[in-house]
Image: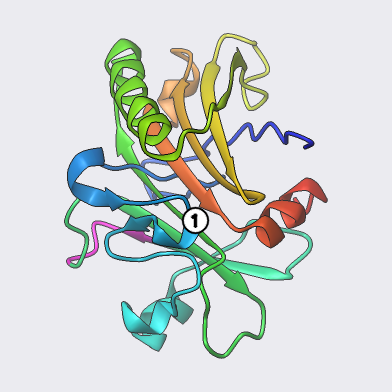
Amino acid sequence: MTIMRMENGTNLKMSNIFLFFFLILFTFKTSISYSSAIKDFTIEGISLGDSVLNFFSKEEILNNKMSYYKNDDYITIGLNNHPSLKQYDWLQISYKKNDKNFIVESLDGILSFDNDYNGCLKKKSEIVLEIKDMTGIEPEEYEDKHRGDPSGKSKFNNSEFYIDNDVIAISCIDWSKKMEEKYFDHLKVIINSAEFNDFLKSNPY
């Protein structure tokens, strides 16, 4: 199986919470449930294959679109500090363009670990261990420089699980002091369908 290394960094401007890549974040034991099937993983009660309309109004969906891709086969919405969110500060959901049912193809969220990279890595390790215990799958793990920082001083640490070609990715981002003028350090988890993962591999940005 070809492993896609998703450098899922953020471009989170504090002024408007602009979420650049795909982020998911949670308090693991209370906010996610799962089995061996990707659709059994839920975030805020939402899973891949659900209709966004079951959780948010059509007006909320249309008013919270994010501009990510040159290729607009998929639409992403971003919701921050929404009253329905119990575990996350931010939630992002992607669905196919022109899909009147707004079926979830990618689900993500974020939690700040500002200036606490070690704390982020500790929480990430707990999450990774729980997923390994429940699925029996060994993740692909790596750490590298973040391409969003020209200085090379920012880094990310990723763990990726592949379940029938669908993907769960858990990551910590540690921005350099200069980059922290615009962005903040965070923990993230991404849940992508296989089809959406193929879309990302096509470099749609």
Q: Amino acid at mark 1?
A: Ile
Residue at the location (34% across, 82% down)? 54
Q: Residue at x 37, y 38 (%)?
A: 134
Residue sitting farthest toward the front: 136
Q: Which residue is mark 1?
A: 38
- Element on which disc 1 rests: helix
Asked where in the image residue 153 lies, by quadrant, the reply is: top right
Asked if residue 65 lies in the magenta stretch, the reply is no
Residue 42's x, y, as percent?
Answer: 35, 58
Colouring used for the render: rainbow
User: At 27% from the left edge and 60% from the top edge, which residue is drawn?
Assistant: 44
Residue at 46%, 50% (x, y): give it.
Answer: 36
Check the image and report above or below for 198 versus 130: below
On the image, the x and y values in percent for residue 12 come to 45, 41
Q: Residues within 10 Å of mark 1 (few under 14, many from 20)?
A: many
Q: Who is closer to the viewer here, 75 or 37?
A: 37
Left/right of residue 170 with respect to residue 115 in the rendered view: right
Q: Quadrant of residue 140?
A: top right
Residue 199, placed above or below residue 57: above
- The residue stretch that appears in magenta: 79-83
Left/right placement of residue 46 relative to residue 93 reads left
Nearest to the observer: residue 22 or residue 35: 35
- Splitting the image into 4 quarters, where does residue 181 fall? top left
* Quadrant location, the N terminus: top right
